[in-house]
Image (cartoon, rainbow, N blue to C red):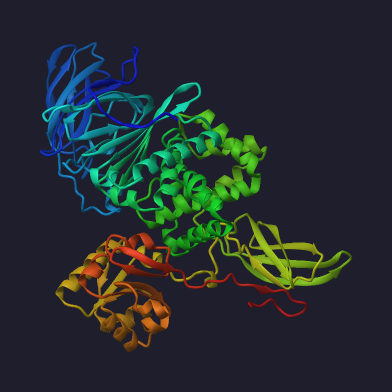
Amino acid sequence: MMPRGWLAGALLLLTLGARAAADLDLEVTLEPATRQLEVIAELPVGGRSFAFSLHESLSVREVRAAGLLVAASVAGDRSDAGDGRRSWRIALPAGVDRVRIAYGGTLPATETGRDHRQVRQRLPPMAAAAGSFLSAGSGWYPQPPLALFSYRVRLSLPGEQRAVVAGSLRAERLPRAGADRYAAEFEFTRPTDGIDLMAGPWRVRERLLARAGASPLRLRTYFPPALDAEAGLAEGYLADSARYIERYSALIGAYPYDAFSIVASPLPTGLGMPTLTYLGVDVLRLPFIRATSLGHEVLHNWWGNGVYVDARSGNWSEGLTTFLADYAFSEERSAAAAHALRLAWLRDAAALPASEQPALRDFRSRRHGAEAAVGYGKAAMFFLMLRDRIGDAAFAQALRDFWQTQRFRHAGWDDLRRAFERASGSDLRGVFEQWLGSRQLPVFTVEDAVASRSPSGHRLRLTLRQPSPALAVRLPVEIAGGTHGVTRWVEVTGERSLAEFDLDFLPERIRIDPAARTWRRLQEAELPLILRRWVGALKPRWVVVGGDAAFREAAAAVVGRFFERPAVLLRLADLRAALAAGESVMIVGTPAAVDAALLANGLPQQAQTLGHNATRGSARVWTVEPGPLLLVAASDAAALRSLARPLPHYGGQSWLVFDGEQASDRGLWPAPVPAFTVRGDAPAAHQ
């Protein structure tokens, strides 16, 4: 590992030698303080006319083709309804294969008030001295008439600013005096489908990592001064990035790029792009991010940014990345941590209404909880079930084969299937078709379990049921008796499945999939009430009790951020009717007013439900049966308002204690896996 250092000096030429022309060449001048953007774009065209779109804040200044001025005309107010872009058209002389377009304008201001859900929507190109983000889909550059293209971007900004796009840093000039500007050149020679540009008042740290047979790997952090000044933070991100890159290079294949950067965003983003990740400043400060999310974003350089997703058949990348990063890290911490994550996936899915269960092949990107539960949780569970089926060695070989075959190409679920089939020697078409197409959370129950004597000791005859339409599932069943226990896998193929096992102990109890290794609907006893049930509710309702006008205003802010759909405000007098109708209701209020509302409706008060936690913190959030209800009790308007940003992130919890924005404690209500009694002559019964 080569020594790190602060960037300093004049023009730094980082790569020498001739380079092929890029498909798209951009010369960008950005003034974040005034939000002024000026760009000169050179790109290929085809035919006698070229149509493109730019964000409505940008206008074409001049177009040249073969050295001649060419007229550009507005072809429409917007290229797509409501996307903020305007269409342009250029008529070209014969024989022209490239054009030079100069354009610019004043960008919208960076909207730092957006929450994590809002930044998942299509964003306009935004600029401000505190940070600028020009996303690939925002219309800040003309798209070449190519599905995939290479690019070169030259950047010029005021001296206190830095900027970055995905790719190799070819040259960089740092300001030496107050009036000097910052300049950098990036190049992306691999085929890609978009360019994201980020800028900010960053301090840059760098570490070069030596690689056998390749140029050194450039690791960087782009942090604002206050974040960069936090002791050990930037260095920790650089060291952990190097560790993750080495890990996945060994598992999958060599890291496909020559750089990786961690870039701080003024928005609550969590985005992975080739050669970098763009994470919100507040997120970067969280102590667990380096142990979880950072590895996830590094891995996206293989899955999603190394092998591109063929969206026509669904997005496999997020599920595979979740399985090989988030879940793998949990497995390494402990069996209990991995079990907890599997349960969290199943509980998130069970909290969704049946109509909100999309098929895995329908998942494209995460915009709300239902898509996250399927595209991340269900997909990761699918890969777990696949590994359980074909074994660790075949699974690992399939990953390497898939990478070598598909890197820098678009690939779909069928390409993945073929890689796993080659590695395992198995026909997996039926497995993939079922789990990609099914919208079901299958429910498995024990219809009967009968023990009898056998020459080897004891025989268990087990009958399992599932509703129609039945899925084909390898279902683990735990068989216990006395101090003995064993797990057997049952091939469940129909609505009613029979299995027999010879055992050397007397079986007494059966538990279905107690380790949660199968995609299924958890039984009611396994389902503690969690906040996710309310987050994604189809018709959420809320009631505010106690407090003054400022408190009620804060309550509305919390509700607006928490629910994924608009919530209807009810009167307290309407609570009983709403609960009787099965509505998802949240009560928000001061502690005394919440207790009074619970008492008036015959429901347990805080102390009865939360115990010693009932008086802790500045705010408490918990679910309660009967009802069911979600309660939020805050000491005052400030304590309540502080929940608006963090609360939606805790959908997998049953209760929380907050001190300001910090969740100082949290947990789940007990939810044991139910056992079924093995009988002689009596029917099977719950125990």
Residue toward you, 522 or 175 = 175
Q: Is residue 134 left or right of residue 357?
A: left
Question: Which quarter of the figure has residue 115?
Answer: bottom left
Q: Residue, x 56% and y 56% (percent of image)?
A: 334
Question: Which quarter of the figure has residue 460?
Answer: bottom right
Residue toward you, 5 or 57 = 5
**Residue 417 screen position, x and y as percent:** 57, 39
Residue toward you, 301 or 230 = 230
Q: Residue, x 31% and y 16% (percent of image)?
A: 21
Residue toward you, 580 or 301 = 301
Q: Is residue 223 left or right of residue 180?
A: right
**Residue 668 sits above or below residue 152 on the image:** below
Question: Which quarter of the figure has residue 130?
Answer: top left
Q: Is residue 312 visible?
A: no
**Residue 605 screen position, x and y as percent:** 37, 84
**Residue 423 sits above or below residue 537 on the image:** above
**Residue 653 sits above or below residue 687 on the image:** above
Q: Quadrant of the N terminus?
A: top left
**Residue 628 sits above or below residue 662 on the image:** below
